Structure formats: structure tokens, C-alpha cells
Amino acid sequence: MSAAAVPAAERMDWFADLIADQLVPTAISSESRDSFWAEATALDLGRVQVSTFDFSPLRSTRTAAHVRRGDPEQYQLGLVTHGSMSLVQNRSDSGPFSGDMVLWDTSRPMDSDTVPGADGLIRGVTLSFPKDAMPLRGARVERLLAQRIPGGYGMGAILAQYLRSLTAHAPDCGPAELERIGAVALDLVGTCLAGRLGDEGAAAAPARETALLARIDAFVDHNLGDPRLTPAAVAARHGISLRRLQLLLRDRGESPAARIRQLRLERCRADLADPGLLGRPVRAVAGRWGFTDPSVFSRAFRDAYGTSPTEYRREAVREAAVRRISGARGGRPPGE
């Protein structure tokens, strides 16, 4: 949804209605009313909804009257990806934050303010979910309202990365997959918030398991180029036995060794298909992603993709060249 088709004088009112529909009724004001701009998307993930927003700087106030007028009885978690925001609720003030997250309660009044990035816009992601979906209850959650949740390290970084990935990839998923994605999002939120309270045990067992898998995935992804990355090393890094790691991944239909090998092969395949890396020998591509034996890499690549690394690179580069030529021709208007 974009304000492009809305007259400039009506865009703020349009955006206020959109916010009321997707999140909650609020009063918004802006010094840039005549040049106000906004875009938004929304995606249902079962009990969870994820929304993205791009908008000009504004101030938002939700009063007790707004709460009485419309309250979905939700918690909403906002991640600011560009520009900055501050939020006040329940006598707490987040202060300005960017790249981080904050939690608010739709049943309470609140105020927020924003500062745009260099392009004059604020961008963010909001996850909305019913209060009864939160594994934490009552006064424990109150302690977290309007408290900045750092998105640059630890469980907060994993949650923030997951929210970003939702906006990029979830629209390509089917209904059943979307519900599973929403359930994972809830588990990660519960584990992250429990950690902020200093009590990871407050999260339900499935949530802790989901969070552990997310940490394992992030660790493996970050260390694929290290030849010392083995299932035993992954298990040791996360304080679990190799058997526990195997059981965790078995539920996803994977084994630790196969998971590492698959991800390394995918990275190698992407590099081999990149025309900008033609000058890098195949063995160097393999070594970059943790394959120390070229013959082992070649066999694994052929088993996975039905062709040798060299043949795959040759064909991928040829197809890319054909697409560029076809695209250039197709971009010309008829008759030119």
C-alpha cells in the first residue's frame, strides 16, 4: 500500500486510517504534512501479523480514549531499520533507538516520536500478536514495555534478523508455511524477552528449543568458511552434546554434517555463478567455504547438482550473458 495515489493534502489522514487498521487507532502529527509520504505492507502469519512501514517523520499519540475506541489486546514489537524512534509507555521511555526493538501494549496509552534518516524517511517492522500468545504474563511483561531491546548482539540480534527476513521472504511461502513461520517468531520473541528479564527458563520448552536452533543456525552460517566447523565444534560451542545436536536437527529432517555441507555447497554454487568471480579458481572458491580437499569438493558438488563445479560455472556464466542480452533487447520499446 502506497500513498502515491493519494492527494498530498490527504496522505496523513490516509496513513492514520492505515495505522488504525493494521495496528491501533492513534493521533498523528507531522511538520511535513504537505510533503508527507508513506508505504506499508502487511502479512498474516496465523496468530501473528508482520507489518512494514516507510514514512515521513511524525509524532504519534495513543490516548485512553483511543484505547476505548479500539483495542486488539495485543503486544506489538517494533524494529526500526532506518532513521530512529522513541517511545513512552507505562512510565518508561525507550529514548531514541535505531536498529533496535521496543515492545508496547495496545491496552495502554503511549507516545512516540521519530527522526528520519538521510532520505527523510523512517523504516520499520512491527510484529503484532495476542497477549495470550506470550509465554510471559502480567507484571513481568510490564517491566519490558518501552524498554529498548538491542538488536546488535545475542538473542536480540537473532530476533531482529528474523524480523528482517520475514519481510523479504515470507510473502513467497504458502499458508501452512506462514503459520509455522509465525509460531517460530513467537518462540523467538518469548525467549528474547525472557532473556531480557534474566530468566531464560521463563520461556516454554519449545520456545527455548527454537531459540537454540536459531543460535545454532546463526553460528553455522557465520562460520561456514572455517574448516574446523564440524558438528562436534557446533555442539561444544553451544554447551550441548553431539547427540543432542543430532536430535535437534533430526526433527527438521537434517543431520549436522549434512546441514553444514549443504550450506557450504550453496555458497560455492553462488560464487561459481557470479561473473565477477571468474578470476577466482574453483579450488579457491571451495577453500573460501571450508572445503580443504578439491577432489572431495568436486565429488560433493557433482552429487548435489549433477555436474562438475567447472561445468556449472561455464553454463551459469553463459546463461547470465544470454539474460543480459535478452533483457537489453526486451527493454526497447516496439519499433525502436
Image (tube, rainbow, N blue to C red):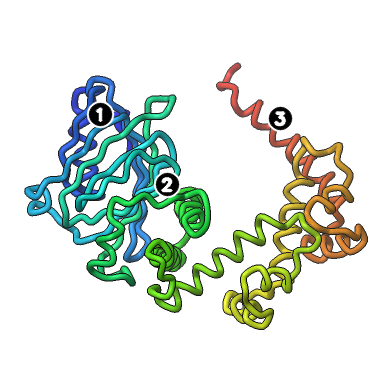
Residue 292 visible in the displayed image: yes
**From the viewer's perspective, is the residue at label 2 or at label 1 nearer?**
2
How far separated are the C-alphas under marks 3 and 2?
43 Å
Of marks 3 and 1, the one in the foreground:
1
As drawn, 276 above or below 166: above
Q: CA distance from mark 2 to mark 1?
A: 31 Å
Q: Are marks 3 and 1 in contact (CB under 8 Å)?
A: no
- Which numbered mark, 3 or 2, is in the foreground of this view? 2
In the rendered structure, the answer to whether residue 74 lies left or right of residue 292 reads: left
User: Which of disc 2 and disc 3 is earlier in sequence?
Assistant: 2
> What is the distance, in whole Å, between disc 3 and disc 1 at their CAs?
38 Å
Judging from the image, what secondary structure is the residue with disc 1 in? loop
Bin the neighbour count of mark 1 within 10 Å (Cα to Cα): few under 14, some 14-19, many 20 and up: some
Residue at image mark 2: 100
Q: Judge whether residue 175 can be spotted in this image.
A: no
Spot occupied by residue 1 in the image (x, y as percentages of width and height): 32, 39
What residue sits right under mark 1 in the picture?
Answer: 6
**Residue drawn at (59%, 77%), measured in percent from left and top?**
248
Q: Which one is in front, 57 or 36?
A: 57
Which element type, helix, strand or loop, lies under badge 2? loop
Please name the residue shown 19% across and 27% down the image: 10
At label 1, the amino acid type is: Val
